[in-house]
Image (tube, rainbow, N blue to C red):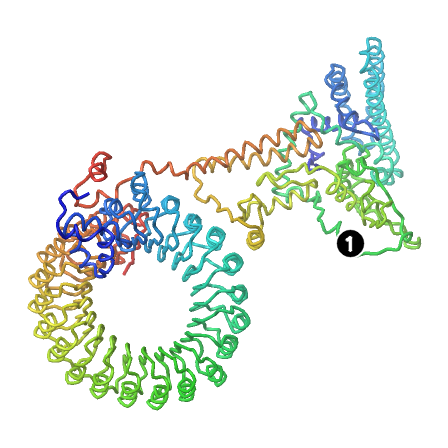
Amino acid sequence: MSSENPSFTDFNLQQRQKQQQKWEDAMISPPFGGFNQASESGYLLLSNRDNQTKILDHQEDGKSTGTLGTNKVQDWDPRAMLSNLSFLEEKIHHLQDLVHLFVGHKGSGLGGQDQLITQQQQFLITADLTSIIVQLISTTGSLLPSVKHTLSADIPNGELGGLLFPPMAGMNCSPQPQNGGGSKVSDQSSKMDVAGDCGAGQSHFIEEHETKEEEDADEGEYLPPGSYDILQLEKEEILAPHSHFCAICGKGFKRDANLRMHMRGHGDEYKTPAALAKPTKESSSDPVVIKRYSCPFSGCKRNKDHKKFQPLKSLLCVKNHYKRTHCDKSYTCSRCHTKKFSVMADLKTHEKHCGKDNWLCSCGTTFSRKDKLFGHIALFQGHTPAIPVEETRGPAVSSDKMDGKEASNKVGNINFSFGSPAATGSGAKNVMEVNEDADDPSSYFSPLGFDTCNFGGFHEFPRPPFDDSESSFSFLLS
Amino acid sequence: MPTRSTPILSLLTEDLLIRVNEKLVQDSDRKKWRLICKEFHRVDSLARKTLRVLHVEFLLSLLKNYTNLHTLDLSVCPRIEDGTISLLLHHVDHSIWARNLKCLNLSRANGLKFAGLEMLVGACKGLESVDVSYCCGFGDREAAAISGCEGLRELRMDKCLGVGDVGLAKIVVGCGRLERLSLKWCMEISDLGVELLCKKCLELKFLDVSYLKVTNESLRSIASLPKLEDLAMVGCPYVNDVGLQFLEIGCPSLQKIDVARCDCVSSSGLSSLIGGHSGLLHIDAGHCFSEVSPTIVKCIQKLKNLNTIIIDGIRVSDTIFQTISSNCNSLIEIGLSKCEGVTNMGIIKLVSGCVNLKIINLTCCRSIADAAISAIANSCRNLLCLKLESCNMITGKSLEQLGLHCLLLEVLDLTDCCGINDRGLERLYRCSRILCLKLGLCTNISDKGLFYIASSCPELQELDLYRCQNIGDDGLAALSSGCKKLRKLNLSYCVEVTDKGTKSLGYLEELSDLELRGLDKITSVGLTALVTRCKRLIYLDLKHCEKIDDSGFQALAYYSRNLRQLNLSYCAITDMTLCMLMGNMTRLQDVDLVHLTNVTVEGFELVLRACCVRIKKIKLVAALSFLLSSEVQGILHARGCKIRWD
């Protein structure tokens, strides 16, 4: 998801728009902790109203200056500062307008829904306020070079970043009515594909490949209870797509290293070796307290209240464990359309192998290796290996091509519609369509195809003198 | 059905007639029966259980006629295709034949693909035995089609080159009751397939995994088969002693083992296998290891019931003969082909104990002399088959002893035994049961010898006179009057033979295989005289018969409709005649057309188009591969025809 890498030195219009989009994300993101389905739908309801578009319109105005500011901040230009401040002022004004609007609406309230809408409005306002605060801090940071380092290093890691921007997913997932959002989704999906194919081009972005081993590695470890600190993150924190945020533009990153790479674009001061270096741990003189993590899901073995509690080793372990164990498997393999995963990395790992020497059983189960398939067949009565339709011509080829397109589409969908039921539905529909296509070539092999059998082998013989027409055979048959 | 009953039919009821009919063995007798009257014909149709079809164009009417068939053999029927099957099954009335069918031979039916097989299997619900050997184009899909035969007990898939583990898996899951399975030369099958086979088909009694790239792991699985009696694993290069040790403790019912040409098997491996199975009846370990070790000799002592031991190409000593002689008294067959160390003394020791020996193969045991043969003749009175190829020290004395004592002798191979002359053959006069006699390269044999053979061996079916250069027309005349049952005759390079001789061969009505290679005195006259009478010719080799011109080949084209295999290399045939020949011979499947100087490229093009429907194998000059149109080559390839480029 962090695949977007606009180069800040080369600013064209398109990228500027994207940048604006990011501003939108940052600005509207509501920092509510209890983000749940109900609130999301509530938000959707709200977003359909015209006031939402108005907000965006308003932002549009301020944005150009905002991006300008970020561009020039590296020179510590008073003019940039001025524009930043005026942008902030404008934002505050805009927020004021919004509140006004809400006040107006409250007058003509809708009775039962009133309560909910009020809540939503509160969230929206809080979100805007938050983004203003962030902007303020970052502006301050760029003003004071001495503070800058600590800020850039600490804010994304520290509480503030985590607190301010956790539910980004919520923003991304809501199908936004404005055209900017839509184009962005499709744009990113295609970009996503590129990133997956040629990582070399984007080499400075570390690929997100958490392997299963990372979670399972600690199986054998035994730490006596009490010898380590237990940390328990909330569900929302775990599910947040990003944990590191740019203090200047608010862009989120999964990894600190990626953020540091990103920061280079905000000025030369971020390009120093010290700024790019991995933030060092506390001095070795401090006693190292071992940190272990607990899963927030009560009843889980990884939850600290469980009788046989087994702690998780790292933040990554927590994330993967939680998604794998307590979340829906919303990523479906675009090749086989059967395997489902809740962790994107698992899907990618699977897709690497899926389709390559795919050994299929008559029951529909697929295996990456022949011996596994044969083991399965040996175990189950009546199961046989399915013979791949190697002679696929015509329709099958086209379905194959479609598969490819579908794949990229779906990856896009999944990436940017996390948790959205509507998008998942469409994904499932796609799957079905593909299945139909895959079924098609089988009709090619139906015995009906031989109704028009050729009698070529027969009429080659000079005797007996019958030809290949049905009627001439009838005398032999009667 | 018959309205005008003849007196004989009023006496003989239908079931009596059927019983009489069942006593008929020979095809010719059955043919006569059918021709007697309609009722007899009907009874034959009802009673007939086996049908071997020679012409595909009659298949439909034949199957319509014979509805109680148990066995259908299409192995010599050229070009069975999916379309043919569809036609045979399309008319509901005619699929009656399929219902009772138990045994189906589709060997070499390369034109058949999985769709046709699927239809066939679907119609023949009761199939128990299927032979699809040498269908080189068969793959997993065809195997999947065969797997529809749930009741299948026997399956031969030799050289189905495309069938891999997946295909085998289909079969073993679909046909769980398999008892006999041959996977010889199914090169794609690996340990995985064999392992699955051994888990699913526990009824397996016979398994042939010869020439597969299977390892000891397969033997580990095979060892778990409870009912396996016969295991053939010829030429498995990845199997070694460790694998045989698995078999030592497994396969409790094992009776026959064939480990010939398994290069990594040593005598200790084989002895461990033998050690675990004292009830073994049959051992074939030819070309396995270099020398018979004392441990094997020790193990063989326990094999009291051993019937057959074949140790071709292994160095032996007299001790093993001593051991076999004193322990394996029921030995019937011994194979010592190309064994070093076989001495007269050894053989004398062997036959002193094993008096029941019926088949002895001493091919290339060059130190064998008359003493050994005399001992064999004296001890083994029931001898049926004796192979003495390249035993140069054999003389007429041996034949004299055989003629005196071995009156049941059926097969005698004396190829390249220079010591054999006409007088020796005269001594065989009491061996009147001889069916097969091989005298190739016995240059001392003349017409006189053939005269003795003709007078003493009336049952002779196969005679090999390769390069017996003293043979002439008179000998052949004697042969054609004395050995009326001769079917196979090799006269290659008997250069004295002329038209007169070939004309006399025309009186051998049963003749089916005839090799006349390099007879440059034969002309069209002789060939015409031959083919007008020998209607049963199936295989004819005319390579280097350069005097024969178009008129002879035209006669061949007209009369020899049953030819299946033909060699015309280096002949003087021209475009038109070759075209006519190839178009007319409806059963021709394999033809050699190398170095035909009078045939043009256009001629070849036309010829190939004329015969592409049914030809299965063709040999052409390599240069033609560039000259022939790709279209014709494509057609041949698509039809499953194999082109060998010389």
Asked where in the image residue A242 lies, by quadrant, the reply is top right
Q: Is residue B434 left or right of residue B448?
A: right
Q: Is residue A116 above or below residue A474?
A: above
- Identify the residue shown where x is 58% and y is 31%: A430
Q: Residue furthest front?
A: B11
Indicate the position of residue B422 as horizontal and vertical percent values: 15, 83
- Label 1: chain letter: A
- The residue type indicated by label 1 comes to Glu
- Residue B358 or residue A49, whichever sits in front: B358
- Residue B122 or residue A431, whichever sits in front: B122
- Residue B527 or residue B201, whichever sits in front: B201
Q: Is residue B483 above or below residue B90?
A: below
- Identify the residue shown where x is 37% and y is 47%: B124
- Identify the residue shown where x is 15% and y is 85%: B423
Q: Is residue B515 above or below residue B351?
A: above
Residue A67 visible within the image: no
Residue A407 visible within the image: yes
Question: Where, quadrant-wise, is the C terminus of chain A in this rendering?
Answer: top left
Indicate the position of residue B495 as horizontal and vertical percent values: 13, 72
Q: How many marks?
A: 1
Q: Secondary structure at mark 1?
A: helix
Mark 1 highlights which residue?
A: A219
- Residue B337 or residue B282, whichever sits in front: B282
